[in-house]
Image (tube, rainbow, N blue to C red):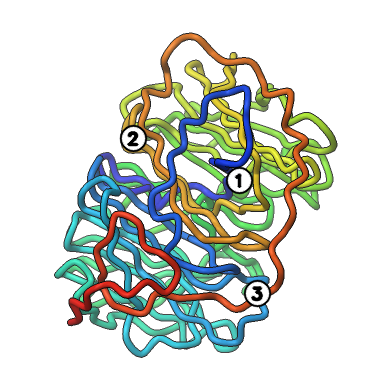
């Protein structure tokens, strides 16, 4: 979820969506696209749309998977999702995808995580739509957040360290460090940071928000005293340089929502959207709609009831409307990005999900006439049996629907 205006690869955690075998009281707006590329225990962990036609995403086996071989897969469409291309980055076995930073259909950066040795985290760039990748950085500053403000200026942030570049990643600054202990983990999740203009915000697991207003060259730490010791802000999104929304989805307590009107310096707690029916609801994503001041999409879900709800506010949280409700199908949505009121994408997968997939919202989300909640959401949805993933067998294969292990024409590098 990055440029136009520059925006993060999306927000963190979503639980949706379409299930043909179940009837719902709310007409589904999330349409499956790349819904059969991978097998069980894969997750689309980062996603960014640069316009209504071009989407880049990164996927790998779930953090909770028992599959021994990890590989970062890069997925791309340039026609709004009618066709998808996918491939691994060469020589990256054992890595997970951290984040994606795309500028257009050809230019993209991908950060990769190596769990056992932080000095092996990597950052790659492609200039030809993923046909080839160049290693640009390998150290503890890579692996988590990568963001490019324009073709030349970018920043890499991981844990307590950061570097910036002014030449497209050919060279990087000396390593900078935040005034935090090295154990303060910066969350490598799609919704844990946002960027607009020259400003980037990054959340931490403690009661501080990191912000840079000069493209990552210098940083300040903003205290968040309203958070408790066990509380975190792990998703954040801005409609402009001053106005934003954040959520604290701590899973053992009711979620809390906050808004800011001064770029994140101070925050006001607001009333969240009505919770999902049942036990404690979980917030999975917060995403601002570009060009619509005060418009935010929020995804809530409940694992116990296997339901997910999509809520919209047009007034920064003063009022909320329910836009859709679906069986959650044990999906975890790790990335969401809207480029307009009409076009948004979410990447799903992980846990007990049958498939990692990508869904597209293709109806104006602000239309009047809200549907009531679905009364039949307690359908018993079983989890698939444990199994190994079924990765695609060919590079950059084009298909309107790619089946597990499908044999498509190889257009290799």
Q: Are marks 3 and 2 in contact (CB under 8 Å)?
A: no
Quadrant in the rendering for residue 239: top left
Q: Position of residue 252 (x, y in %)?
A: 83, 46
The residue lying at 72 percent from left, 43 percent from top is: 306
Element at badge 2?
Answer: loop
Element carrying mark 3: loop
Q: Residues within 10 Å of mark 3 (few under 14, many from 20)?
A: many
Where is residue 311 shown, x and y percent of the image?
57, 26
The earlier-in-sequence mark between 1 and 3 is 1
Q: Earlier in the sequence, mark 3 or mark 2?
A: 3
Q: Which residue is mark 3?
A: 65
Q: Residue at x 30, y 49 (%)?
A: 81
Name of the residue lying farthest toward the top: 369
Residue occupied by mark 1:
15
Q: Gap in Å between the C-alphas at discs 2 and 1?
A: 18 Å
Answer with left or right where residue 121 lies relative to residue 181: left
Give x and y (percent) for residue 141: 44, 75
In terms of secondary structure, where does tag 1 sit? loop
Of callouts 2 and 1, the N-terminal one:
1
Q: State the residue in front, 378 or 147.
A: 378
Residue beneath label 2, please? 343
Mark 2 closeness class: few <14, some 14–19, many ≥20 residues within 10 Å: many
Left or right of 132: which side holds 336? right
Instruction: Give residue 146's position: percent from left, percent from top.
Output: 38, 64
Q: Nearer the viewer, residue 325 or 177?
A: 325
């Amino acid at each position: 979820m990055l440029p136009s205006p520059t925006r993060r690869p999306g927000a963190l955690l979503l639980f949706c969506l379409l299930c043909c075998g179940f009837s719902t009281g709310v007409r589904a707006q999330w349409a499956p696209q790349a819904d059969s590329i991978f097998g069980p225990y894969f997750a689309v962990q980062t996603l960014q749309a640069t316009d209504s036609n071009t989407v880049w995403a990164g996927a790998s086996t779930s953090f909770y998977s028992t599959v021994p071989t990890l590989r970062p897969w890069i997925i791309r469409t340039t026609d709004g999702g009618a066709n998808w291309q996918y491939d691994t980055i060469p020589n990256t076995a054992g890595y997970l995808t951290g984040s994606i930073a795309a500028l257009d259909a050809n230019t993209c950066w991908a950060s990769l995580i190596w769990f056992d040795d932080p000095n092996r985290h990597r950052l790659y760039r492609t200039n030809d739509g993923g046909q080839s990748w160049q290693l640009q950085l390998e150290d503890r500053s890579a692996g988590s957040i990568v963001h490019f403000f324009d073709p030349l200026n970018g920043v890499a942030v991981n844990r307590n360290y950061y570097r910036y570049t002014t030449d497209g990643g050919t060279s990087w600054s000396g390593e900078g460090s935040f005034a935090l202990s090295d154990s303060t983990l910066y969350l490598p999740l799609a919704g844990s940071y946002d960027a607009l203009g020259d400003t980037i915000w990054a959340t931490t697991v403690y009661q501080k928000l990191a912000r840079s207003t000069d493209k990552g060259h210098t940083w300040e730490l903003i205290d968040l005293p309203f958070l408790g010791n066990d509380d975190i802000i792990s998703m954040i999104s801005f409609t402009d340089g001053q106005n934003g929304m954040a959520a604290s989805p701590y899973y053992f307590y009711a979620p809390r929502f906050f808004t800011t009107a001064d770029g994140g310096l101070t925050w006001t707690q607001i009333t969240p959207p009505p919770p999902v029916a049942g036990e404690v609801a979980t917030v999975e994503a917060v995403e601002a709609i570009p060009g619509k001041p005060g418009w935010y999409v929020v995804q809530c879900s409940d694992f116990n009831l296997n339901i997910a709800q999509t809520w919209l506010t047009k007034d920064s949280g003063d009022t909320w409307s329910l836009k859709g409700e679906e069986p959650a199908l044990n999906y975890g949505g790790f990335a969401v990005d809207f480029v307009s009121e009409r076009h948004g994408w979410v990447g799903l997968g992980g846990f007990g999900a049958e498939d990692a997939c990508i869904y597209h919202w293709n109806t104006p989300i602000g239309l009047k006439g809200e549907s009531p909640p679905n009364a039949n959401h307690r359908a018993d949805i079983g989890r698939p049996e444990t199994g190994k993933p079924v990765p695609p067998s060919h590079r950059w294969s084009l298909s309107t629907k790619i089946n597990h292990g499908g044999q498509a024409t190889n257009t290799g590098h």
